Image (cartoon, rainbow, N blue to C red):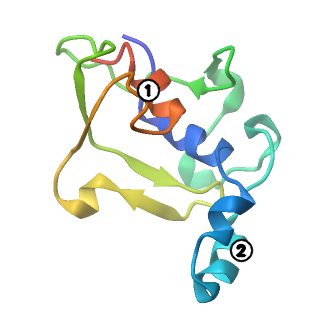
Amino acid sequence: MRRATLCLVLAVLTGCSLDAVRSKPLGAQSKAKENLVVGAPETLTYAPSLNVDIDMMARTESGLYWKDLTEGTGAEAVRGSVAVVEYSGWLANGNLFDSSKNAGKPFSFPLGQGRVIAGWDEGVAGMR
């Protein structure tokens, strides 16, 4: 088992760009710019509520930071399998921006097929 939920948060944070902001309606652009986090994960200041300590995390060659929070007992997630995850994503300032819990059901996707952001394919592989 490798990686845990936190890797998903950091993958999203490092994947932010102004292109994502520009694709939003004008009214939402200013709000999105307020929350935009730019910089390498190790240079950011994280809200205390997130309990992020980059120095206690592993880093892959691609730059994905991860840390096991809890170890599962199911089958290992491998390329080609369908991953079913519950997730929450926070900005570095501690604001929640997305959560499968709000939708009331887990999120599923085919692992390793490029159907989600690259950090998810990389980070979920090996989870149980």
On the image, numbered disc 2 is attached to which residue? 34
Amino acid marked by disc 2: Glu
Q: Secondary structure at mark 1?
A: helix
Within-10-Å neighbours for mark 2: few <14, some 14–19, many 20+ = few
Disc ID at residue 41? none
Residue 20: percent from the left, percent from the top? 63, 61
Question: Which residue is painted at 52% across and 31% down in the image?
Answer: 118
Q: Are marks 1 and 2 in contact (CB under 8 Å)?
A: no
Q: Residue at x 28, y 43 (%)?
A: 86
Image location of residue 113, percent across then percent down:
38, 26
Q: Quadrant of residue 49?
A: bottom right
Q: In the displayed image of the protein, which residue is found farthest to the bottom? A: 27
Q: Taking the image as drawn, is residue 51 in sight?
A: no
Task: Tell me if I can see residue 32 in this picture.
Answer: yes
Q: Is residue 48 left or right of residue 118?
A: right
Which residue is identified by label 1?
121
| Coordinates of residue 123 in the picture (x, y in percent) | 47, 24
Q: Is residue 69 above or below residue 39?
A: above
Alpha-carbon span between mark 1 and mark 2: 28 Å
Q: Nearer the viewer, mark 1 or mark 2?
A: 1
User: What's under tag 1, amino acid-wise?
Assistant: Asp
Question: Dot 1, how many residues are within 10 Å of its Cα: few (below 14), some (14-19), or many (20+)?
Answer: many
Return the disc, 1 or 2, that comes first in the chain's sequence: 2
At x 65%, y 79%, the residue is 29
**Is residue 68 left or right of 23 when viewed as pictured?**
left
> Which quadrant would the N terminus be assigned to in this image?
top left
- Determine whether 31 is above or below 11 in the image: below
Q: Is residue 28 left or right of residue 44?
A: left
Residue 34 occupies which quadrant of the picture?
A: bottom right
